[in-house]
Amino acid sequence: MPRLIVISNRLPLGDAPSGGLVVALEEALTASGGLWIGSYGIAKAPAPALTKHPGANFERATFDLTEAEHEGYYLGYANSVLWPICHGRADLIEIQPDHLDTYRAVNARVARLTAEILEPDDIIWVQDYHFLPLATELRKLGARNHIGFFLHIPFPSPQDLATLPNAAEVLNWLADFTLIGLQTNRDVFNLRDCTRQLTDAEDVEDGLIHLGHRTLNVAAFPIGIDVAAFTKDARNADPDDRIRFLTGAALMIGVDRLDYSKGLPQRFRAFGQLLEDHEELHEKIAFLQIAPPTRGEMQAYQDIREETEHLAGRINGRFAALNWTPIRYIHRAIPREVLAGLFAQARIGLVTPLADGMNLVAKEYVAAQDPSDPGVLILSRFAGAAEEMEAALQINPHDAYETSEAIATALKMPLEERQQRHTALLEAITKHDVKWWSRTFLEALANTA
């Protein structure tokens, strides 16, 4: 079996890999004697070679980033340009030429470090928007290996991609990958439209995009979760971690990183609209929003934190009673096993991003439910998960009235309908679970000419 090399921005270190992308890739890496490469920490000067880290069932190695590289490559081009572009927020981009230069330079260095340990039969799987130029840099160094790429966030529309100073270059970078994996069919359509409008692509057919002498192979591979493991976590959750309400209120839960793409202010306003329009629901519903911080040094994230805290305080100040607080807002991470129990307890899972590649919280909420008395998933139609999870109550998160009425509908939904919806949702997430995702992508990559 060829060795699998995974390359991502960060390397998950620790003796027992768990959660997210690690769960998705651990089996494939272990089976092939694979290697995971990523960054870890800030250094004054980059090390001349990859640094190995024992302690897992597969090999792990890190490269260093300097403070300037972290600023330009990560905070700069990746997260102040590519991230907002991919999430439909071109108004938030901060274009600085030196950031793009640093982004290119980091990718070139990671390619050199990888090429030094690369064997002819190795298969490379590059993860996410931090490494769009990596295949191009590896090809320059003579690599002829199969190189796959998976984008975990949405692929931008032609209008958004065109705001980049190097839009055509980005598409040419992608052409050097053997296979491009995207989350949804919508993303595949966006990539095709971008090549039509922004390059001299000759023709598009059957997932193949002909760009000069190269061919872009692109398909949707929706990422999933380990359904059985998360269901087990929910069943085994500590009863002491349950939330108790003096008024017997039903729990509605939202769990999101504090990011402007997640639609938290719109969500809070919709909940306020619910309390405004449905006085009979006062003290009958309690909203728990968990929003761990992310990229707190960036102004856009400072702004979203201030706005959400202001809205939570205003809604609680207006509607709270002596024994009832409408919103509990937690701005820190909660352990995975505790979250599983909270999902199981929640009558409503509120997942309302303005743009999202997939959103695994939606799938975790469904996996945590008791099939005999399941809760209701309210899902933004702009989440990638909406393509698979049609049985959710799908809403437009920009419409506070529609979202608030969906919450009211979920609270009043009869058991039979809740069970029917949950059965369909559970079937969907079980069919496309995390092992299906990695296995299907790697099989397609191996079979791509």
Image: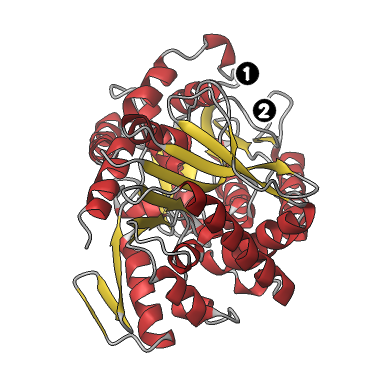
Three-letter residue code for mark 1: Leu
Q: Is residue 40 visible?
A: yes
* Colouring method of the image: secondary structure
Residue 341 percent coordinates (x, y): 49, 21
Three-letter residue code for mark 2: Trp
Instruction: Decide: is 289 above or below 95.
Output: above
Q: Quadrant of the N terminus?
A: top left
Give the spatial CA distance, label 2 vs label 1.
7 Å
The quadrant in which residue 374 appears is top left
Residue 144 percent coordinates (x, y): 35, 61
- Residue located 77% across and 41% down the image: 317
Instruction: Decide: is 324 above or below 279.
Output: above
Label 2, on which residue? 324
In the depicted view, which residue is nearer to us: 301 or 103?
Answer: 103
Q: Is mark 2 on a helix, strand or loop?
A: loop
Label 1, on which residue? 246
Q: Is label 2 in contact with label 1 (beta carbons under 8 Å)? A: yes
Q: Residues within 10 Å of mark 1 (few under 14, many from 20)?
A: few
Residue 311 percent coordinates (x, y): 72, 49
Count of picture labels: 2
In this rendering, position of residue 161 left or right of residue 423: right
Residue 219 percent coordinates (x, y): 28, 61
Q: What element carries label 1?
A: loop
Q: Is residue 409 visible?
A: no
In the depicted view, which residue is nearer to us: 183 or 78?
Answer: 78
Instruction: Decide: is 153 above or below 338.
Output: below
In this rendering, position of residue 18 left or right of residue 283: left
Q: Quadrant of the C terminus?
A: bottom left
- Residue located 39% across and 50% down the image: 124
Nearer-N-terminus badge (2/1): 1
- Residue located 60% across and 58% down the image: 109
